[in-house]
Amino acid sequence: MTLLSEKLKYDPWETYQEIADVKIVLHCSRYWMLSEWECENMSFPFWRLYHSRTGGSFVTFEASEHELTNDKLLLIPPYTSFSTRIKTLKSIQSESIRGVSIKSETEIDFYRQSGMCDQLFVHFNLGYPLDKIKAGIYEIELSDYWLNELMQIERDRLEAPESIGFLSHIKITGLISFALQHLPAGLWHFPVVDKRILNVMKYIDENLKESLNNNELSAVANLATNYFARLFRESLGLSVQEYIQKKRVENAVMLFHHSDMEIVEIAFESGFYDRHHFSRIFKKHTGFSPAAYRDKIRRG
């Protein structure tokens, strides 16, 4: 009996297959009833996905207004600056987010009668370069299949608001994949970045807490330090250290939104070892001190 090689059993094709690195990182998913959603300049380093059964809440981008309704999803890429409102409060003068958690289907109709709107939202990231597509509000029409899936996702959020289990996670990431597939194809055209630079970017993402210097990172790229620094800037339009600062601030923003960590913990987890340095760099990038940013989130 002639035995086949392990390589042939694994993959009988001789040609190498290049596979796009797509990784959905889920930050949170919540389902609740909104009474106020009056916000300006909503812009974050993560994707947002919205759905509503009841309708009545709106997202505006560049003078184009989109209503959250049962028959579609709204998908918003990172760093899209948009505003929001509830139809019953169009003339409100200050920013405000108010809502209540709900525990059963019957509560949806009860709160709806008082003018409130239900809302499912999901926050996630895809990583570079998939997080860098054109800003906008993208409407995704829903088939009967995905309407049924959404109903189950929302029921899961009602029954287990503090946790997302394995099956629920699969459903949510499936919904995200469905929505991404229905974005305009032209959005996914990106400039070609040297694979050595991509490897360094991945290394930075995985080691933000560490002290990252150009000598260490050039070794990851297997390039001379000066050439690596020049190639990095040419590829991304930022110096290596500017890029690291930007990623650390993005990570801090993510933790402010999706964790209960203290400011000093967020600074450390994002690679800042001095709170005063963290405050200075964070304000430079966001316009807010860390404390003011946290207060803004808590006030809505």
Image (cartoon, rainbow, N blue to C red):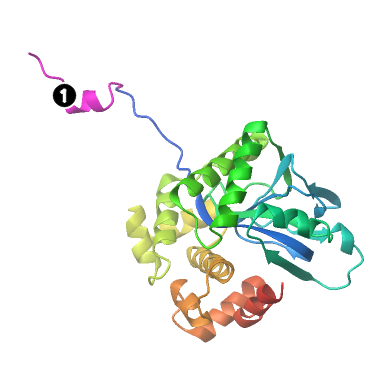
Type of amino acid at the residue the image marks with label 1: Ser
Q: Establish if 270 lies above or below 128.
A: below
Rendering coords of residue 139 (x, y %): 73, 41
Which residue is painted at 63% across and 44% down in the image? 151
Which residue is painted at 40% across and 49% down in the image? 196
**53 horizontally vs 8: left or right:** right
Q: Which residue is mark 1?
A: 5
Q: Establish if 292 lies above or below 206.
A: below
Q: Secondary structure at mark 1?
A: loop
Q: Which residues are magenta?
A: 1-13
Quarter of the image that includes the C terminus: bottom right
Q: Is residue 60 magenta?
A: no
Q: Is residue 12 magenta?
A: yes
Rendering coords of residue 69 (x, y %): 77, 45
Magenta stretch secondary structure, dominant = loop
**186 horizontally vs 115: left or right:** left
Q: Is residue 234 visible?
A: no
Q: Nearer the viewer, residue 141 or 151?
A: 151
Residue 43 occupies which quadrant of the picture? bottom right
The residue positioned farthest toward the front in the image shown: 106
The residue positioned farthest toward the right in the image shown: 91
The residue positioned farthest toward the bottom in the image shown: 276
Rendering coords of residue 3 (x, y %): 11, 19
